[in-house]
Amino acid sequence: MPPGPLRLFVSVRPDPAVASIMAGLLPPGLPPSTRPVPIAQIHLTLQFIGETAPSRVDEIIESISASLAGLRSQRLVPSDLRVLPERGPARTIALITAWPAPIAEARRRLAMRLAKRPGKERAEAFLPHLTLARVPPGWTPDRRSWPVSLAPFDVVEVELVRSVLAPGGAVHQVVASFPLPPG
């Protein structure tokens, strides 16, 4: 690991075949400068950790492992595509899903252990979503949601991910994986 701070988050990803299908859900009429998220980087963030000293990585891995105690593989059910944020200028197109109760509990535990200000983060205020594309500043959509027809998908692993900001967009590197036993 490099000596400087690491930008970290905890996430789940669909398998590549499902992520490829998700990428194909983008609605027509998006501006040409829309930037689709690379298929390998489509994920649902459970907890953003932020800038972290490399010396804390082992401690963070232990905290994630403890937070996931008892969690088994889960099924996520996509509901619709939405422009996010829901109010204000559009920034992303995202696939919305619901939290199964065990993932919501794991997310609550992660926030308590890893959030910079755990009292300020409310799990119920977070809209579970997988970002599929970033839209250019100033784009005004003619609608803010679209129905989707996508089968539920299984989450079988949680990952600690490093995000490196680069001129062409973020590059993600898996730091640690936490397989979930069959549900």
Image (cartoon, rainbow, N blue to C red):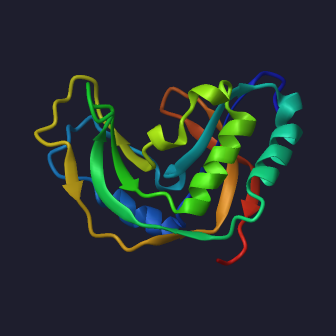
Q: Residue at x 29, y 57 (%)?
A: 80
**In the rendered image, which quarter contains the N terminus?**
top right
Closer to us: 105 or 155:
105
Please state the horizontal and vertical placement of residue 138, each as a whole percent of the image: 22, 23
Left or right? Give the position of 103 relative to 98: right
Which image quarter: residue 73? bottom right
Please state if 60 lies on the left or on the right of 31 as rendered. Answer: right
Q: Is residue 164 above or below residue 14?
A: above
Quadrant of residue 48 within the rendered picture: top right
User: Looking at the figure, which quarter contains the C terminus?
Assistant: bottom right
Q: Residue furthest left?
A: 142
Look at the picture and state if 116 lies above or below 149. Answer: above
Asked if one can make out residue 161 in the rendered structure from this viewpoint, the answer is: no
166 vs 21, nearest the viewer: 21
Residue 181 visible: yes
- Kindly identify the residue that appears in the image at 72 percent across and 35 percent down: 114
User: Residue 129: where, in percent of width, then height?
Assistant: 43, 49
Q: Is residue 62 left or right of residue 26?
A: right
Q: Residue placed at 26% from the left, 63% from the top?
A: 148
User: Residue 72: image x %, image y %?
Assistant: 68, 70
Q: Position of residue 83 (x, y in %)?
A: 27, 41
159 over 76 or under it: above or below: above
Q: Would residue 125 be found to the left or right of residue 83 on screen?
A: right
| Image point (48%, 32%), residue name | 168
164, 149: nearer the viewer: 149
Q: How many marks?
A: 0
Instruction: Choose top left, top right, bottom left or bottom right for residue 103.
Output: bottom right
